[in-house]
Each structure stands twice: as C-alpha cells, then as structure tokens.
Amino acid sequence: MCGIVGYIGSEEAEETLLTGLKRLEYRGYDSAGLAIVGDNDLHVEKQEGKVDDLRGALDGHPMKGTLGIGHTRWATHGAPTDENAHPHVSTDGSFALVHNGIIENHSTLKTQLQEKGYAFKSETDTEVLVRLIEEVKRETELSLPEAVRQALTQVVGAYGIAVVSREDPDLLLAARKGSPLILGVGDGEYFIGSDAAPLVEHTRQVVYLNDGEMVTMRRSGYEVTTIENEPLDKEVHELEWSLGEIEKGGYDHFMLKEIMEQPDAMADAMRGRVLPDENDIVLGGLHDVWDRLHEADRVVIAACGTSWHAALVGEYLIETFAQVPVEVEYASEFRYRDPILRDGDVVLVISQSGETADTLAAVREAQSRDVPCFGICNVVGSTIARETDAGVYLHAGPEIGVASTKAFTAQVTVLSMMALKLAKGRTLSEAELARNIQALADVPGQVRDVVEETNERLEEMAEVYRYASNFLYLGRGYNFPVALEGALKLKEISYIHAEGYPAAEMKHGPIALIDRFMPVVFIAMKDSTYDKVLSNIEEVAARDGSVIAITDEGNGELDELCEFVIEIPQTEEFLSPLLTVIPLQLLSYHIAVMRGCHVDQPRNLAKSVTVE
Ligand code: AGP
C-alpha cells in the first residue's frame, strides 16, 4: 500500500526522505509528498506522480530542516491528485501527518467535525484524522503526542502514521495499528519506515512496532509505548538485508533481477535445511510445533495472489507426501465465511510481505478459535511472521518488483521441504526420501540453466505475442497452479487479459475462445498427466489455436503441433513447478517491457496490500 518514511537528526532531512521514498516506491506510487520542519516553520511539498516528479519539483529550492516525514500513496479514498497526496496539514499549518491504512469510520468522524466547523480540502480519510487531532487539541489543550493518542482511540480501521510539528522541532511521532512501521535506531538520529528498505543504508538496528504501539523520537532518544501510554521495553533487532540487495544490481528492472536470482533464492531457502548427507530436512522454525503439524488431521492454507498459487502447489505436495487432507482458501474469503475449524486442524498462511491485510486477518481468525497457525513469510519481523505461532522464513532476500517471482519459487521450495519432511518415515522409504531430497537439492542448478538458456528465446517470443489481447494458460496436476501463476504474471505487468485453467477444463467452455488470435500456453512435462495434456494440445491445434508448450528437454513430439516449444530439464514431477514457472515469468516480463509497461510498478497495483 502506501509508503511512509521519517527522519529526525542533525542532517538535512530532504535527501534522506526522498531517497527513502524511492526505496518504498514499490509499495505505492500514484502521488508523493514531504513535510519538513526547519526555521521553526513547517514546509510541505506534495503532488500527484512519482517520487522522481517530486524531486524535480524541489530542484533548485530544497526544503531546509533536519526533521521530516514523507509518503508515497496508493489511493484508497480519493483519486491520485495533489490535494489528496500526503502529508495532510492541520488547519493552522502547525503539524503534518502521513498515513498508511484505511480509517473505516472516516465518514462519521468527518460529519461530526464538519458540524464543528472544520473544513476539508481533500477526499481522503487521512485528512479526517488530522482534523480529529486538531479538535482533540482544541478541546483538551493536550500536547500533540497526547492528542494523537486520544484521537487514535476514536479511529476504527488500520493505520500507520507519522507526525511532525513546527511547534516541537525535536519530535518525530509514529504509531501503528494494522499497517507496518519500523523504527531505525541511528547515532543521535532516528528513522521510521514502512519497511526496512529506506532504513538499511543508514542503520541496521531496528525496532519493529506492533499494533497499538506508538514511538516518540527526539534527537536525545526514543520511547515506545502503547497507544494508551504504557511504556514498553522493545528489543532492538539487526537487519538482515544489505543495501546491495535492495538495489537493481545492473538489471533494467527489479523483476528481472529477481527472476535471475531464483537459483540463489531457492538455494538460500534450502540452506541448512535440506541435508542430503543426513537424508533429512530440518525446519528450525517449526521444530517446537512439528508434532502438531505432523499429526494434523487437516491443513488449511490461506493466502492471496501468487502466494495462493503457491498454496495450491502445497496442497498437491502435502496430500501426496503426507496423505493429509489440505484445503486452500483465499484469505479474504476465509476471514469472513465463519470457517469450520476443528481440533486437529492446522492453519498455514503464506505471505511474501508478511503484511497482507487479508492474510493477517486469517491468522487472527484461526488463533481466535485456538487453532495453531504457522506462517511461511519472506520479510523477517513482518507482522504475520511475528503473530503466527511458528513459521519458516523464505530467506529469498527483498522482493521489490510488485510481480512476485522469486518469492513464489521460494515458497514452493519451502512447501516441498515440508512435504518431504512430513513423508519421512510415513509414506516414503529412506531410499525414496533420499532420491527426492537429492532431486530438490539439484533444482537450483537446473533453474540456473533454465533462466540462462531460455531467456533469449522468450524475448524473441515476446516480439510475436506482445500485441495479443488474450492468453490462456493450461496445466494439470502440480502444474495447474503454475498455469494460474503464469496468467497472473502476464495480467499484472503487461495488462493483457489472461486466464489459467486445469487443461481438462478447456472443454467445459474456454475452448470456445480458441482461434489463431488466442495464444494458449501449455505446461506439458512428460509426467503422469502428459498424455492427457497432449490430447488437449491436439484439440487446440485442430482449431487453429496458437500453442506455446513448456516441456522436457528432447521431447520432439510437440514441434509439429506448437508455434513455440520451450524445453527445460526434467525433474521429479512434484518439483516441476519450480522449473516450469520460469519461462512463464520471463515471457510476461519481456512482453511487458515491449509494451512499455512499468514492470516493477504496474498500474493500480501495490507490493503489499495492507488494506482490505
Ligand atoms: C503477485 O505477483 C502479486 N504481487 C500479488 O498477487 C501478491 O502475491 C499478493 O498480494 C500476496 O502478497 P503477499 O505474498 O505479500 O501476502
């Protein structure tokens, strides 16, 4: 959603804030703004557009001051306009506030405030919070921190806020409920950020704020309390990310960098966990709860988007290897449908960001029913990672591109490890386990071959298909979720409509769409489903459909039927998603680039959907 950054120290704030916003731009980027306190005055610059546009507007007349806040917006209330951009400022111009989240009772509050004579310039819910703080200050003469606390107790919904005031040039205030905020602890300087990206070049000492917590920062130090002003003693953590990891590393886009990083990301996900020499899998984060998972009568997996596709692969993996029933739910459905959960159930949530609102709500729904909830997350210290009872980190490194790539394959890698560990001593002999563990350990090398050997060909293919209006993606078994993922990748970065289906489903409707203008991507690995998929390919080819097939190296029997055949190494059937998804990622990437789309920041999307 939106990105928040704040700074208090002895250096000029503007550059730190602008650079910080740039690193947060993948979270939201339809407008941006800064508020800086200097010379006992509050200076605000905000506008529709990207951070670079804001930087351009400031060129030649920088805002002086060593205290400030910044914001990149992903519009929830009110279109992207200069007026709706954050920061929002008090009527008297004394303080400014930035906000990430949704104030659900903003209409009621706004009406009450308008009746008291307050005027509003924007259509945002955030401005309502500013006016509410003003009203609390007017009514009670409380200090700004106390007025903010008081106001927040009247707010229903989610917020991450940062506040500065010209009346207290030694105060940076931040509070969170539902939207992430991290405090960066420097030497006589402090930072606040929606995640670690804007902090890492300044400090690796961080404090993770939990819901219902507020931090007041002054140049002499900081204090974390509850919103109700109960002091808290918070642990200072060491950030794992390096600056290099959040830079593009010479690639044109973060997405391409992250596609190419997948061999390393998978290897990092397995490091210290996949032990071929011991014929074992070790998942330290689940060690204390392993019996609960091992003895589960049922596993419910809740997630969103690409993580939901990984969950579908997990369903096949866990049912196949552990013989335990698995149910996969959209987190947004799970949280509202009063799900039936029983003793013996375990809920597993998957979230790259660890901040997705619907998935976080699924965690809380499960825990409210005393059902253990475990997480698979990438961002260390993220809310979901901290609120689940246990979990496994992906260790895939920061994923900046909005379209998830290395997180998906890392999630499937973790799910594969879990499935094999569940199978140990249960459905697999030691020899079968050894074979499968070795096959998993070999996958990163195979993925490296795929990214290196298919990228150029997929770029050529993108030239052919860049003008298509629709795509179909078809697969069976473990590769049905990959078909869904391939379709999502294309949709979200090239804006071409695409649908994924189980290949057999084509005959139940989608085949009516087939003509020579409809590219159909088949995942046709020579596995247990191959013969059926081959029949489906023949059905499409017979109707003049344009077929693209992903298949095993050396499988020459598709050449006559298909426009393009992408050959990839053979692996165990259950591991094939880790390979088959790569060409689909690259095809989407190249088509999107050729269509001039903003690959890392696709229109209307945000990297982490921290509101409903
Ligand atoms: C995937 O490319 C999208 N960015 C989106 O569907 C994403 O997977 C979804 O929002 C879930 O995000 P999470 O894994 O951080 O919870």
Image (spheres, rainbow, N blue to C red):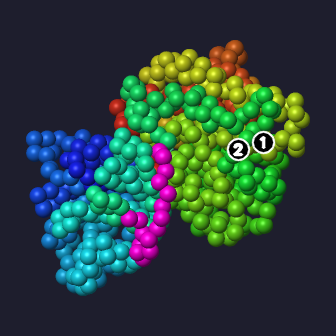
Q: Amino acid at mark 1?
A: Lys
234 magenta-colored: yes
Q: Is the residue marked by circle 1 packed among few (<14), some (14-19), or many (20+) residues within 10 Å?
A: many
The count of marks equals: 2
Q: x%, y% of residue 2?
A: 37, 54
Q: Amino acid at mark 2?
A: Leu
The residue under label 1 is: 421
Q: Are marks 1 and 2 in contact (CB under 8 Å)?
A: yes
29 magenta-colored: no
- Pick the front one: 459 or 179: 179
Give the image quarter of residue 396.
top right
Q: x%, y% of residue 56?
A: 17, 41
Q: Is residue 506 visible?
A: no
Question: Magenta stretch?
Answer: 223-239
- Pick the front one: 185 or 3: 185
- Pick the front one: 89 or 124: 89
Compare marks 1 and 2 and give the one earlier in the sequence. 2
**Residue at 82% over, 55% down:** 295
Left or right: 540 with respect to 109?
right
503 vs 293: above or below: above
